[in-house]
Image (tube, rainbow, N blue to C red):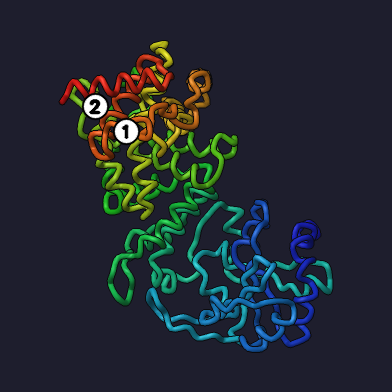
Amino acid sequence: MKTYFNLLEPLISPIKPILETLIAAGATPYLVGGCVRDMVIGRPLKDLDLELHGITLEKTQQVLTSFGHVSLVGKQFGVLRLAAYDIDWSLPRADSLGRKPTVAIDPHLGIMAACKRRDLTMNAMAIDLGIMLSTKEVIIIDHYGGLNDIYNQQLRAVDEELFIQDPLRFFRVMQFIGRFQMQPDKALNILCQRMSLNDPVSGNHLALERVSGEIKKLFTLSERPSLAFRWLAHINKLHDLFPELAILQDTPQRPDYHPEGSVFEHTMQAIDAAARFKKNKLVTDDQECMLIMLGVLCHDLGKTLTTTPDLKAHGHDEAGVPIAQALCKKLTNNQELIKAVEILVRHHLAPFILVASHSSPRAYKRLAARLGHTVTMRQLGLVALADRQGRNGQGHEPLSNNMDLFTAFLQQCDATAVTHGPEAPVLLGRHLVDIVAPGPKLGELLQKAYTYQIEKGVTDVDALRTYALKNYKSRR
């Protein structure tokens, strides 16, 4: 356990005076939840979740106030925040059912009862920080077998009756499968297969913002997000939740292009390929990661409508746009993100077609103009790369090839200065307002001039003005 102390000590040291003051006031501070789990698994430790037993909320607030400003944003739930520390200082509680539960803070609930209220055994472990500070030893409190389940790569509910009271836990299991590549035990599979995903009190559907938070974790923190969707299929929940994906299981592909099999298998391999982009620093942040992941998840949805008996799927890029919109609306309420995904789906075939065809610079400029400022050529190239890498006919792991195509595409984008956005229009409204009044006609002329600029490579403002006015006069 000495190794655990060395891992935790740098995180605990800055708050040691606060912990000692809380202990002197009668509190027993426990480290709980994800931090303990990640420490055992061997993942980087970031956030601390502290649970304070044996002390009232008022006394906790009094102690914390002596170290800085205390935020009361979660006071009704027994959660306080201390300025300058990214830590939740919480008290044990027993909640009623429903989305807006009645909260009963109980300082004397006991760590065993408090851990019982957690979802999975791997999240139900705790560390007494008082013991750690006094002995420099880390003793993991594990009443429900979390250590053994982590060792066996198994997800298991702490208490089945409590588990089903919060349907969000279903989606937490889903993202944990992808993040930790652990599988639910038989009992948890049955539980998730049978449980209602509606609020147990109101009967309403689970709020989208709660679900989207778990989906974001799945896509931004997982190395194998496909495992989550494969699990949904295994417990017969995929069709109920995401029929747009379920139908892909029965959509075949040409084996010479797609030896991996169905569109579903291809899509699963492709999202795993895209998941590697963050680790390889091909995506810049979580926002871009979500865009690429959703774009890859949706890129071939149109094949369900366009695949012919001879397994051709011409036009699936365009046909997939409305289906992608429908699926994305179940995963996020970010309308800008959904619109960006639609653009990626519509044009996902273009990057490597341009490369293979040795297309001219204006073809790259034309594509960048179609994308506008919603997505970049580099982002579109990443979706195309994941598409190509999701074609392993020998197993479920994605391939690592076609980086040469992606590099060639980026080189051409760089050469035409459209990697991060379309070529800027040279002719602007101010160049024409002396003759054409602001309005639809002016916008139409500017668009014609911009197309002429790209197609002919004209960058002289006077030449573009002359061209635009010629079009204007010819229509009068």
Whether tag 2 and tag 1 are in contact, CB under 8 A, the answer is no
Position in image of residue 72 (x %, y %):
57, 79
Label 2 crowd (10 A; few <14 / some 14-19 / many >=20):
some
Which of disc 1 and disc 2 is earlier in sequence?
A: 2
Residue visible at 67% across and 88% down in the picture:
59
Residue bearing the label numbered 1 = 434
With respect to residue 197, does 27 lie above or below? below
Q: Residue furthest left?
A: 476
Closer to us: 458 or 326: 458
Residue bearing the label numbered 2 = 315
Position in image of residue 168 (x %, y %):
41, 64
With respect to residue 266, does 97 lie above or below? below
Q: Quadrant of residue 366?
A: top left
Closer to us: 432 or 388: 432
With respect to residue 405, does 95 lie above or below? below
With respect to residue 349, does 13 lie above or below? below
Residue type at mark 1 is Asp
